[in-house]
Amino acid sequence: MQTKATEFDQISRNVFYPIYPVIAQQILEAGNGISEGDCLDVGSGPGYVGLSIAEQTKMKVCLYDMDRAGTRAILVRCFICVL
């Protein structure tokens, strides 16, 4: 049985994944050119927007979500990105 976090992660990865870099770019453009420093993504869900911001900048991005299953998915994804 899938948890809601797992189901949301699968939808995010399989349906919405191409749009996350575009959303990140729009956020960065609205930030008046900020591309370094710290970024806190609160309610990050599976973390795709925050990770897209990290890929497009030199920011240190902290992803936070109250759902522990979602947080585990983020940790696995970040570990894979480092490898």
Image: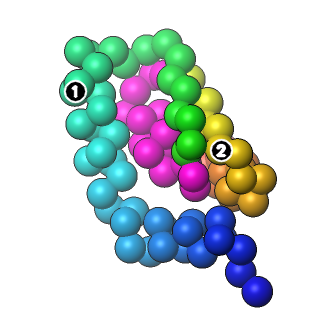
Q: Earlier in the sequence, mark 2 or mark 1?
A: 1
Q: Nearer the viewer, residue 8 or 59?
A: 8
Alpha-carbon span between mark 2 and mark 1: 24 Å
Q: Which quadrant would the N terminus be assigned to in this image? A: bottom right
The kind of residue tagged 2 is Asp
Q: Nearer the viewer, residue 66 or 59?
A: 66
Q: Residue at x 71, y 80 (%)?
A: 2
Q: How many marks?
A: 2
- Secondary structure, mark 2, is loop
The kind of residue tagged 1 is Glu
For residue 8, side relative to residue 6 (left or right): left
Check the image and report above or below for 50 versus 5.
above
Coloring scheme used: rainbow
Check the image and report above or below for 48 versus 24.
below
Check the image and report above or below for 26 versus 58.
below
Farthest bottom residue?
Answer: 1
Residue 76 visible? The answer is no
Residue 48 is one of the magenta-drawn residues: yes
Q: Main secondary structure of the magenta part?
A: helix
Residue holding disc 2: 65
For residue 63, side relative to residue 76 (left or right): left
* Residue 22, x across and y down, in percent: 26, 47
- Secondary structure, mark 1, is helix
Magenta-tinted stretch:
45-59
Disc assigned to residue 29 = 1
Q: Residue at x 50, y 42 (%)?
A: 51
* Residue 26, x across and y down, in percent: 24, 36
Is the C-beta separation of discs 2 and 1 under 8 Å? Answer: no
